[in-house]
Image: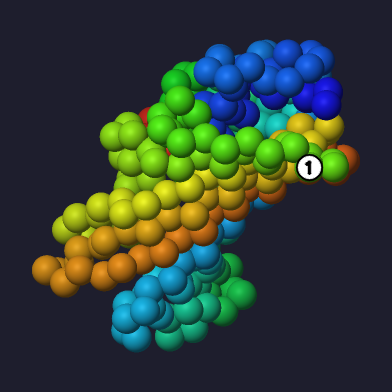
């Protein structure tokens, strides 16, 4: 199967997966992605959470309304993040990020019951490491390393290759646990990963999807809850789009980078 090249920036925001050659299979253990500036694709993220506690189940249901769509166009990236909460009405936060030539632009909007309450535009210089960390968060499981699993199963089906990783090491466990800590925004005492598997589906076009199944013990106000999470990243190489600077980018307020990515 001919494997698609994936640029370094994409893998930084998704997974530290193996190097891709221009033709042929990936080689196990090679973790530095091949760089190409011509590829364009879309990543859609989603997360489903389940807690069998009646009260906390509703709380976690709100957390899964965090969705991102990431558009990669060579070395330019646009990310659209939407977070919706139902609490005495519908509250929606939307951010549109544009990253190009070492600058990140953020167009923020906040709605209550579909009525715009506030908006803001800001920009800041951003380093490649800061880009990686920021996009890792948008993709929930960004930063997972292939060689950080002790069990790997590979299967070749008619139209795709399937690789399943399990038994994460300490570093990968931290990535999974930080995902929940970030979702809870500090509203927890402790998060402990119980188990996790990662399944990567790959076709001739490239990645088809990446799915993580995880289970956690989450301690909130002294009570321990069992939380199950399914994280899904879907890849689309056929969608037509363009990533370009905002027409009024010169009017964006210059701020510190932490005002945007934290």
Q: Can residue 159 be seen in this view?
A: yes
- How was this image coloured? rainbow
Which residue is at the front of the view, 139 or 260?
139
Position of residue 119 relative to residue 243, above or below, is: below
Q: Residue 27, located in which quarter of the rendered image? A: top right
In this rendering, position of residue 136 left or right of residue 38 = left
Q: How crowded is mark 1: few (under 14 residues within 10 Å), some or many (20 or more)?
A: few
Position of residue 239 relative to residue 258, above or below, is: below
Q: Which residue lies furthest to the left in this view?
A: 222
Position of residue 69 relative to residue 161, above or below, is: below
Q: Where is residue 223 in the image (x, y as percent from the top left)?
A: 16, 72
Q: Is residue 262 visible?
A: no
In this rendering, position of residue 108 left or right of residue 51 = right
Tell me the residue that label 1 is attached to.
157
Q: Where is residue 244 in the image (x, y as percent from the top left)?
A: 75, 32
Q: Residue 241, located in which quarter of the rendered image? A: top right
Which residue is at the front of the view, 176 or 12?
176
Q: Position of residue 94 (x, y in %)?
A: 57, 57
Residue at horizontal 46%, vertical 36%? 151
Which residue is at the front of the view, 154 or 208?
154
Residue at horizontal 43%, vertical 55%? 214
In this rendering, position of residue 220 left or right of residue 107 = left
Position of residue 200 relative to residue 32, above or below, is: below
Residue at horizontal 46%, vertical 66%? 49
């Amino acid at each position: 199967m001919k494997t698609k090249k994936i640029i370094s920036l994409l893998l930084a925001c998704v997974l530290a997966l193996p190097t891709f050659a221009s033709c042929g299979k990936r080689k196990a253990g090679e973790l530095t992605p091949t760089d190409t500036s011509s590829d364009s694709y879309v990543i859609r993220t989603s997360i489903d959470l389940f807690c069998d506690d009646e009260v906390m189940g509703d709380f976690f249901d709100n957390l899964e309304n965090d969705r991102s769509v990431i558009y990669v166009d060579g070395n330019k990236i646009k990310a659209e993040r939407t977070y919706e909460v139902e609490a005495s009405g519908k509250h929606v936060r939307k951010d549109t990020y544009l990253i190009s030539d070492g600058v990140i632009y953020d167009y923020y909007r906040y709605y209550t019951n579909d009525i715009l309450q506030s908006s803001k535009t800001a920009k800041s210089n951003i380093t490649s490491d800061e880009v990686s960390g920021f996009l890792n968060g948008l993709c929930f499981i960004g930063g997972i390393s292939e060689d950080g699993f002790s069990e790997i199963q590979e299967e070749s089906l008619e139209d795709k290759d399937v690789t399943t990783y399990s038994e994460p090491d300490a570093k990968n466990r931290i990535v999974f646990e930080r995902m929940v800590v970030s979702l809870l925004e500090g509203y927890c005492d402790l998060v402990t990963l119980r188990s996790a598997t990662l399944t990567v589906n790959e076709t001739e076009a490239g990645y088809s999807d990446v799915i993580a199944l995880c289970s956690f013990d989450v301690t909130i106000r002294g009570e321990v809850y069992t939380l199950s999470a399914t994280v899904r990243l879907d890849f689309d190489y056929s969608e037509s789009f363009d990533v370009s600077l905002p027409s009024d980018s010169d009017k964006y307020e210059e701020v510190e980078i932490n005002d945007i990515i934290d």
